[in-house]
Image: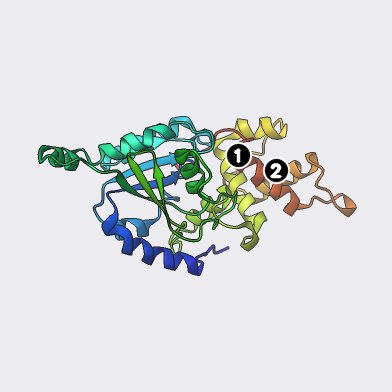
């Protein structure tokens, strides 16, 4: 299944970002800690150029902590500080204004040397849909200033939000790129909820997710769904993955006439439990 999704408002968002760049001091790039590369929009490098950048690995409470630490090392080698945060609970969120200001230490030192008082840092916050931008902004601002929702495409326009006396944020709609060169990127994004389920084949996405989970997080799958043993060679045998899906469906009461398993309903259960963290802390990409 080919996954493509590029609503018209995302084209406008790209143009608007380019128009606002001259006002921006630093870019705050929000990624999903569970898939740091797949949730990193390749258009952003092209659009932003050499602007100072701070990377936030959001939803780190749902991600494998060992792999998150390795991803932080990868980004640091690229020259970008990466902070593991959880916008919903507020974990590490208060360090963001300080870290954003650190990106401009040299510039502000020169201003102070000239007798100037540095103004608030103007930051552009960017990220793909449903990565948690609005939740993060509300947490930083300490009030409801941005619309939130557990679905992609909630933010439709741009707005400036003041965070204390030292940071001003420009929110933008989430941007996905027009085409996924690697279809696995699309599957990872779909599995974690970055793409609207209504335009997807849910069974295909659940099949991909379960195949990955049974290969890399076998014990967590067995424990959550109370399965004693999984079939061997799940990463090589598609029929074995379907058999596990059917087993999960039977255990969760997803049965239709004739005792058959409703795979669509079973798929929904698998994806909901994955996205909510009930399957444990899972990362879909390894550095």
Q: Circle 2 is placed at which residue position?
A: 244
Is residue 143 visible in the rendered image? The answer is yes
Q: Is residue 286 visible?
A: no
Question: Residue 165 placed where, x, y %?
Answer: 34, 39
The crowding category of the residue bearing disc 2, from other C-alpha atoms within 10 Å (few below 14, some 14 to 19, many at least 20), is: many
The vertical placement of 182 against 140, above or below, is below
> In the figure, 88 relative to 197: above or below?
above
| Residue ID for mark 1 | 214
Q: Is residue 5 above or below residue 99?
A: below
Q: Secondary structure at mark 2?
A: helix
Q: Residue at x 89, y 54 (%)?
A: 257
Describe residue 162's horizontal placement relative to residue 233 as left or right. Answer: left
Pick the front one: 163 or 229: 163
Q: Which residue shows up at 60% across the image and 39% down it? A: 214
Q: Nearer the viewer, residue 83 or 155?
A: 155
- Horizontal and vertical percent position of residue 217: 57, 35
Are discs 2 and 1 less than 8 Å apart at CB?
yes
Q: Secondary structure at mark 1?
A: helix
Residue furthest right in the image? 258
Residue 61 coordinates in the image, percent (x, y): 52, 33
């Amino acid at each position: 299944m080919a996954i493509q999704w590029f609503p018209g408002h995302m084209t406008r968002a790209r143009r608007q970002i380019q128009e606002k760049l001259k006002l921006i001091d630093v870019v705050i790039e929000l990624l999903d800690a569970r898939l740091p590369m797949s949730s990193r929009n390749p258009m952003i490098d092209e659009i932003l150029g050499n602007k100072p950048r701070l990377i936030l690995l959001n939803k780190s409470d749902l991600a494998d902590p060992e792999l998150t630490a390795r991803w932080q090392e990868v980004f640091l080698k690229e020259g970008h500080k990466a902070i593991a945060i959880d916008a919903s609970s507020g974990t590490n969120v208060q360090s963001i204004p300080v870290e954003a200001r650190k990106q401009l230490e040299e510039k502000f030192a020169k201003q102070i040397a000239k007798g100037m008082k540095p103004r608030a840092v103007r930051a552009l916050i960017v990220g793909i849909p449903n990565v948690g931008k609005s939740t993060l902004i509300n947490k930083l601002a300490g009030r409801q200033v941005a619309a939130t929702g557990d679905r992609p495409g909630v933010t439709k326009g741009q707005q400036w939000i003041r965070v204390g006396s030292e940071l001003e944020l420009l929110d933008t709609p989430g941007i996905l790129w027009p085409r996924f060169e690697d279809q696995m990127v699309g599957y990872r994004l779909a599995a974690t909820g970055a793409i609207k389920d209504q335009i997807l084949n849910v069974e295909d996405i659940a099949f991909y997710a379960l195949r990955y989970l049974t290969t890399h997080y076998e014990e967590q799958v067995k424990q959550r769904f109370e399965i004693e043993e999984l079939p061997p060679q799940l990463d090589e045998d598609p029929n074995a993955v379907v058999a596990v899906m059917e087993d999960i469906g039977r255990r969760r009461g997803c049965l239709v006439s004739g005792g058959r398993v409703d795979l669509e309903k079973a798929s929904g259960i698998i994806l909901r439990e994955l996205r909510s963290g009930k399957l444990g802390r899972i990362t879909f990409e390894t550095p």
